[in-house]
Amino acid sequence: MIRAIARKEFVQYWRDGRVVTVFGIVALLGLAATVTGWSAVSSMERERASAVAMDREIWDTQGLKNPHTAAHFSRYAFQPTFNLAVFDPGLTDYVGNAIWLEAHYRDPAALRPVEDAVEIQRIAQLNPAWVIQVFGPLLIFILLYGAVAAERESGTLRQLLAAGVRPVSLLLGKAVSAFSLTGLLVCGVLVGSAIVMGAEGIERLPDTGWRTAGLAALYLVYLAIFVFLALGVSALASRSRTALAGLMGVWIVATVLGPRIGPEVAGALAPAPSAPEFAARLDREGADPFWDASEGAVQRRQRVMDAALAEYGVETVEALPINYDGYLLQASEEFANGVFDTMYAELWGSYESQRAIARGFALVSPTIAAQNVSMALAGTGIHAYRHFADEAEAFRREFVLLLNQEMIDHGGADGYAYVSGNDFWRQNPDFEYAAPGIGEAVRGVWPDVIILVLWLAIAIAMAAAGVRRGFLGEMAA
Amino acid sequence: MLEARELTKSFGDVRALNALNVRIGAGESLCLLGANGAGKTTTINLFLAFIEPTSGSALVNGHDVQRDPVGSKRHLAYIPEQVALYPSLTGLENLEFLAELSGHRDYRTAELLRFLERAGLDALEARRRVSGYSKGMRQKVAIAAALARRASAFLLDEPLSGLDPAAANEFTEVLADLRRDGAAILLATHDIFRAMELGTTIGIMKSGELVERLDPGSVTGAELEKIYLESMRGGAAGAGGGPA
C-alpha cells in the first residue's frame, strides 16, 4: 500500500510542471554550487601550494641573520583547504587559512578569501551544503503542502479511507515519495562533490569516506524533519493554500531568519573582543610585562638571570657558557606563551558561549544545528579552525625555541650579533598539518545531533497526530 | 452481504439513525429513498466505519465494521455522488492505484482494461487523463475499481444525481449486472424511477427511521411516488413490505 501511494505520488510529481521546474532549478543550483565549490577549493589549494613553496624559498635564502631576528621574520603555517570544503566550505572564507608564526606573538589567522571578494560575491557565495540546507526544505514544502489538505479538498481522502487505507500508510507513502526525491538531490550533490573532490591538487581529509557517509545521513535526517513537518501541517490545515502559507512561514524562520538572527543575538549577548582590540591586548600583556621598565618586569628579568646563573653555577652573566640574550629571549617567550594560553582560552570560551546561545535558536531552526554538524563533518567549522590554530601555535613554539636554542648554544658572548646562515635555515622543519579524525571532529557537535534527532521525533509525532486528526475529521465530515 | 443490527447513531441530542435493521444478501439491492437528513448517508457512513454507532452494529460479509475495519473493507466498494480521482493520472492509472490499495498488485494492463470496459469505459478513454472526464466516466472508473477489488458489497451514495439520462441508464445497467452476479447493493438515492428499476427492496427513510420497506414488484412507479410523498409529509401509507 505504501509503495502504491509512493509510486502514484511520483507520477503526479512528474506530471506537475511546477514540481519538475522547482526540482530542476534546485538541481541546477546544486550543480552550480558544486562547480563553484570545486573552483574555489582548487584555486585556494593552488595559491597555498605556491605560497608554501615561496615561504620555504624565502626562509632558506634569507642569508646571514640572527636566529631570533629570523624568528621575528619567521614563517607561515598554511592550512590546506581539504576536499570536503567543496561540499561545505563552512567558515573557510572567514577564518583565514594561514597563520604567521613569529616570536613573542600568537597571530590570528590571515588570508581570508572573503577579504578579496567583491560585494556581490559575498552575497552569492554558493555551496552545495547551503543549497540543500535552504532549498531542500523549500522543495519538500512545494511537494507536500497539499499532501493531505489537497486530498481532502478533492475528495480523494474520503475514498482512500473507504478503500481501507490506514493513516500510517498514507503518511509513509507520501513521506517515502518526497523523501526519495529530495534524497536523490542530496545524493546527487554529494556524488557530484565527491567526483570533483577527487581532483588532483585537493587534499583528502582523514576519514573522508566516513565523513561523507555522515554528511549523507545528516542531510537525510535534516530533510526527513521537513518531510514530516510538511505532512503534519498539511494534515492540520483546513485548506492546501493555508498549509502552503504556514509552511512558507516555517521555511523563512527555519532556513532564512534563524541562521542569521541566532549568531547576531549570540554575538550581542556574549561579545568576543574585536580583532584589533584582541591583537593590541596580546601585544600589551604578552610582551610589556617582561620587557618594559616596570618593577614587575625588572623582577621577572632578574629571576631569569638568577636562574641562569644558578643553572650554570657562575656568578656573572659574562661567565655564562651560553648566549644569555638568547636565554632571556626564550624566557620571555615562555612567559608570553602562558599569557597567550589564558587569552586564547578566553577567546575560544567566548566563541563557545556564542555557539551555545546560537544553538538555542536551533529549537526554532533545525538548519542551525544541521549547519554546525555539517561544518564539523566537512572539517570547516570552528573546531577544525581551532585545531589548526592550536597545531600552528604548538609548531610556532617549537620553531621559536629551535631558533632561540641555536642562538643560546652557539652564540656565546656575541649576544644579538650572532648570526646563522642558509645552511642552518635549510635544516629547519616545515609546518605540516594533520587534520583530526572524524571522532575528534564531531566531538563538539553532539548537542546539535541530539537537537536534530529531537526535531525528527517531534516532526514525526506531529505528522502522525496531524494525519490521524485529518483522517478522523474527514470521516466525521 | 450487508447487515445492520439495531444500528443507531446520535449526534448530541439528534438521533440521525434509529435502530435500523436490514439485511442485504448476495444478489439483493436495497434502494433507500428519503429527504436530505433522513439518515441515508449516515447509514452509509456507519457501514464505512467513518463514524461509530451509538449502539448496534453494521456488518459487511459478516465482519463487524468497527471491530474489523480492514477486513470489512476488503470486499466493499463505495461510490459517492462525486467520484474523486487523481486528475493528472489516466483512468487506467487511477484504476491500477485503487486496485493496488486493495492488495491487487498483480493485475496486467489487459485485465485492468477489461474491468474498465465492463464498467463501460473503452481503452482509448481509459488512457486519457481523468482531468478531462465527465462525472459518468469517473463513476465508471469507480465501478471498475470495485470489480478489480472483487467487491461483493456496494455502498452508493446518490451516484445518479447529475448524470444525463443516457449515462444514468448505462450506470443502472452496470449495477443491475453486478447485482445479478451476486453483489449486495445499498443505494441511497432521490430517484424513484431508478430505485424501482434497480432495487430488490425499496426503503423509505424519515428522521433516521426506515418507515417503509417495499417490494418494487408490488407497486407501480406512481404508487411508490405517492407513498414516498405521503411518508415525507407525515404518516406512512403502509402499502407494501418486502423482506430487507
Image (cartoon, coloured by chain):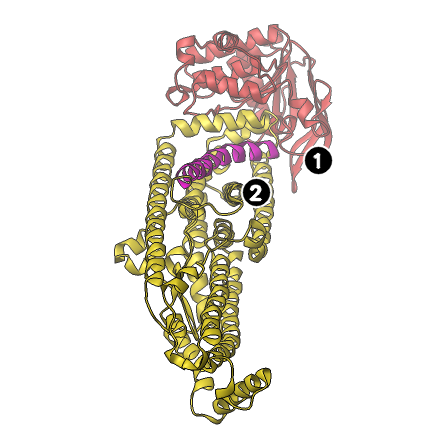
Chain colours: A yellow, B red
The answer to which image quadrant residue A139 occupies is top left
Same chain under badges 1 and 2? The reply is no
In-image side of A328 versus A473 (left or right): left
Q: Is residue B234 visible?
A: no
- Residue type of the residue flagged with mark 1: Thr
Residue at mark 2: A463
Question: Camera-side residue: A116 or B67?
Answer: A116
Question: Is A439 situated above or below B16?
Answer: below
The residue under the point 65% across, 24% down is B210
Question: Is B131 situated above or below B106?
Answer: below
| SS of the residue under disc 1 | loop
- Residue type of the residue flagged with mark 2: Ala
Q: CA distance from mark 1 to mark 2?
A: 30 Å
Report the chain holding disc 2. A
| Residue B36 is inside the magenta segment | no
Report the chain holding disc 1. B
| Residue A170 is inside the magenta segment | yes
The x, y position of residue A445, in whole percent, is 56, 55
Residue at mark 1: B54
The x, y position of residue A271, in whole percent, is 45, 72
Residue A126 numbered tag: none
Question: Is A181 situated above or below A4?
Answer: below
Image quarter (top left, top right, bottom left or bottom right) of the N terminus of chain A: top right
In the image, which residues are magenta? A168-197
The residue under the point 48% across, 68% down is A402
